[in-house]
Amino acid sequence: MGKDSINIYAIAKEAGVSPATVSRVLTKSARVSKEKKERVQALIDKYNFKPNALARKLSNTESKTIGILSSDIRNPFYAALFVECEIAANARGYTVLLCNSLGENKLEDSHLEGLFEQRVDAIIQTGGRVDELISDEEYVAHVNKIADSIPVIITGKLEGSECYQVNIDQGYAMEILMEYVIGLGHEEIALLGGRKNVKSTYDKQLRYRQLLTRHAIEFNKDWIIECESYDIEGGYKCMNQLFDSNKKLPSAVIAINDFTAIGIMRSIREHGLEIPKDISVASFDNTFVSEVATPKLTTVGYDYKLLGETLIDVSISAIYKKDPPRMQLIKSELVIRDSCKEIEEK
């Protein structure tokens, strides 16, 4: 490179990093991996590069952009939440940048680093490894490296991390749904879908068993069936497994989310039964699929507007170092539709 062509962009291109990374090395204002730092510094020394005022200022310039890392935007829950985050951000003068990890850890790491490299002002993560019951230590370290420079806000938990948390009270959600179903006279209640190594599912399973005990209802281990995925196919497999067991069917099924409930309802119909005449079905999330299902689903919903606004407000407060609460809980409400029936007294 000629002397006149030496700038942070040329350094970045030769080093194979982003201009923002070069700026961070120059200003020493944020963490950069040792390997990248040495590579960039070697080129800075080689060309005796002296940044101009614009380059020195680059890493401190507010982008007015908030990165959102979602597990899978095809899931109606994440789609609804993202829309509310975008609306809230736009109303406050920010734009959002969406990335999907699609359940892949490597992609999650890559997107997290990519958002950081693109100099977003904060990162919100919904789903993925922040939902794991036992936090991955390497991922916590990766997140903390980023949280050292910009705020990271999650809708889950990462033990040992410096994240802000905005969560749905999953235990309360299960409680209001179980109280409703039991209040209709159901005592034979199955819980289908999800994995207990995911914290939200673990919390729901725990409260499910607590509610059975509270109402002196015997727990049946055959009526908790897990599945790897949280989608329609996962629910379909769970309900088919229940039918294939050749054991007594429950009078009510609680699905881990609306998406799973659609698969459960499909299986029930394929086995010649009617909802709610033969089996009642209820779920969580109150997404658009609960409204278009046949029959319409009784489900526990969340205030997505409040959840999105809270995530954005915490992000902005943290950006400006206003010390927002480290953890906040969003309550749920029961939405009663047509998929559950009252048990007639014998």
Image (spheres, rainbow, N blue to C red):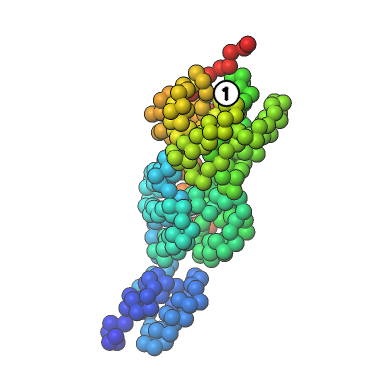
Q: Position of residue 128 (x, y in %)?
A: 50, 52
Please tell me which residue lies in front, 32 or 142.
Answer: 142
Crowd tier of the residue under label 1, counting other residues whose Cα lies within 10 Å: few below 14, some 14–19, many 20 or above: many
292 sits left or right of 143 in the view: left
Q: Position of residue 97 (x, y in %)?
A: 38, 54
Q: How many marks?
A: 1
Vertical position of residue 276 compared to residue 76: above or below: above
Q: Which residue is mark 1?
A: 251
Q: Position of residue 34 (x, y in %)?
A: 51, 77
Please tell me which residue lies in front, 308 or 273.
Answer: 273
Q: Position of residue 7 (x, y in %)?
A: 33, 79
Residue in view at x 69 percent, y 26 percent: 217
Asked where in the image residue 18 lies, by quadrant, the reply is bottom left
The quarter of the image holding the N terminus is bottom left
- Residue 200 shows up from this direction: no
Vertical position of residue 99 compared to residue 345: above or below: below
Q: Residue furthest top?
A: 346
Vertical position of residue 327 compared to residue 260: above or below: below
Please tell me which residue lies in front, 149 or 161.
Answer: 161
Residue in view at x 43 percent, y 81 percent: 39
Residue in view at x 41 percent, y 33 percent: 289
Identity of the amino acid at label 1?
Ser
Please tell me which residue lies in front, 23 or 72.
Answer: 72
Secondary structure of residue under mark 1: loop
The quarter of the image holding the C terminus is top right
- Residue 223 shows up from this direction: yes
